[in-house]
Image (cartoon, rainbow, N blue to C red):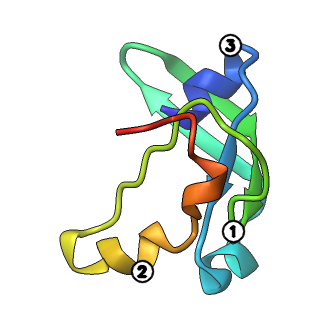
Amino acid sequence: MGAALARSGAEVVLLLRPESLARYRGVIAVDSVVLGRFEAKIAGITVLDRDVDVVWITPKATDLQVALAFAPAAAVKAAGP
């Protein structure tokens, strides 16, 4: 989803755990029957440091509480539930 949004011109940022960010190359490769094959350059960060319109948090259920810490309530106040 993030790669498709970035390709369309939307500003996208990935929230990653520090160990994942260390391995992230800054590019997401997509190979989709619907969207085709493409790569999108997307910045990665470990803590949300800007206002955003939408936040998707998609960890496994057991990691949800940890993942929520990467997007502090003050940064997503306008997004709401």
Disc 3 vs disc 2: Cβ atoms closer than 8 Å?
no
Can you tell which mark lies on residue 47? 1
Would you name the residue on which mark 3 appears?
A: 8
Query: Residue 8, located in which quarter of the rendered image?
Result: top right
Which residue sits at x=41%, y=54%? 57
Which residue sits at x=51%, y=17%? 36
Which amino acid type is marked by label 2? Val
Which residue sits at x=44%, y=71%? 67
For this view, does 24 lie left or right of residue 3? Answer: right
- Image location (x, y in percent) of residue 15: 61, 60
In terms of secondary structure, where does tag 2 sit? helix
Residues 61 and 38: in front is 61
- Image location (x, y in percent) of residue 65: 34, 77
- Quick one: label 2 or label 1, which is nearer the N terminus? 1
Residues 59 and 74: in front is 74
Say which of marks 3 and 2 sits in front: 2
Instruction: State the residue lying farthest toward the bottom.
Output: 19
Neighbour class for label 2 at 10 Å: few (<14), some, many (≥20)?
few
Can you tell which mark lies on residue 66? 2
In terms of secondary structure, where does tag 1 sit? loop
What is the spatial separation of the Cα atoms under label 3 and label 2, in whole angstroms?
Answer: 30 Å
Query: Residue 52, located in which quarter of the rendered image?
Result: top right
What is the spatial separation of the Cα atoms under label 1 and label 3, in whole angstroms?
Answer: 24 Å
Q: Relative to residue 57, is residue 40 depicted above or below? A: above
- Image location (x, y in percent) of residue 76: 58, 47
For this view, does 65 lie left or right of residue 73? Answer: left
In terms of secondary structure, where does tag 3 sit? loop
Which amino acid type is marked by label 3? Ser
Disc 2 vs disc 1: Cβ atoms closer than 8 Å?
no
